[in-house]
Amino acid sequence: QVQLVESGGGLVQAGGSLRLSCAASGRTFSSYGVGWFRQAPGKEREFVAAINWGGRSRTYVDSVKGRFTLSIDKAKNTVYLQMNSLKPEDTAVYYCNIVSGDYNGIGSWGQGTQVTVSS
């Protein structure tokens, strides 16, 4: 069983920055790594980015490339999503989850953390 706790969301103006945290505990070694997903109002949850536990492989969807950056603190089993140059279309509830090699979330979904970007 893996437990994940997201934090760091908030309200920010367009062009601003936020850093999300995902603290993991439990049997993390059974997964590829950690992914971030988001769900905007009225839309399906979508994959945003993922990093493997070794920290050497990162993947981003095109819409966030160059603006979002993943990092991992292995000692704390915590993954960070640094979000810069935020846009109103980034507004969503952000979730982290352990992922398989094809970036599907394979753990339980938590409450997520709300990110709101005002124009």
Image: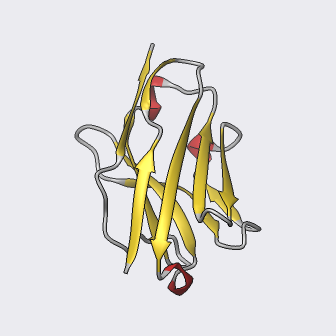
Q: How is the image coloured?
A: secondary structure
- Judge left or right: residue 109 versus residue 25: left
Q: Is residue 84 left or right of residue 119?
A: right
Whether residue 106 appears in this view of the structure is no
* Spot occupied by residue 31 in the image (x, y as percentages of width and height): 52, 81
Picture quarter with the N terminus: bottom left
Asked whether 42 or 97 is in front, the reply is 97
Residue at point 34%, 49% (across, down): 112
Between 45 and 82, the residue placed more toward the observer is 82
* Left or right of residue 39, residue 66 in this image: right
Q: Quadrant of the C terminus?
A: top left
Seen as rendered, the residue at the extreme left is 42
The residue at 26%/37% (across/down) is: 41
Name the spot of residue 90 as percent of width and height, x first. Answer: 46, 33
Residue under the point 32% across and 40% down? 40
x then y, percent, for residue 38:
40, 48
Q: Residue furthest right?
A: 56
**Residue at image location 67% in from the left, 59% down from the top:** 72
Q: Residue furthest bottom?
A: 30
> Which one is nearer the viewer's eye here, 40 or 93?
93
Residue 10 falls left or right of residue 17: left
Q: Tell me: residue 30, above or below residue 45.
A: below
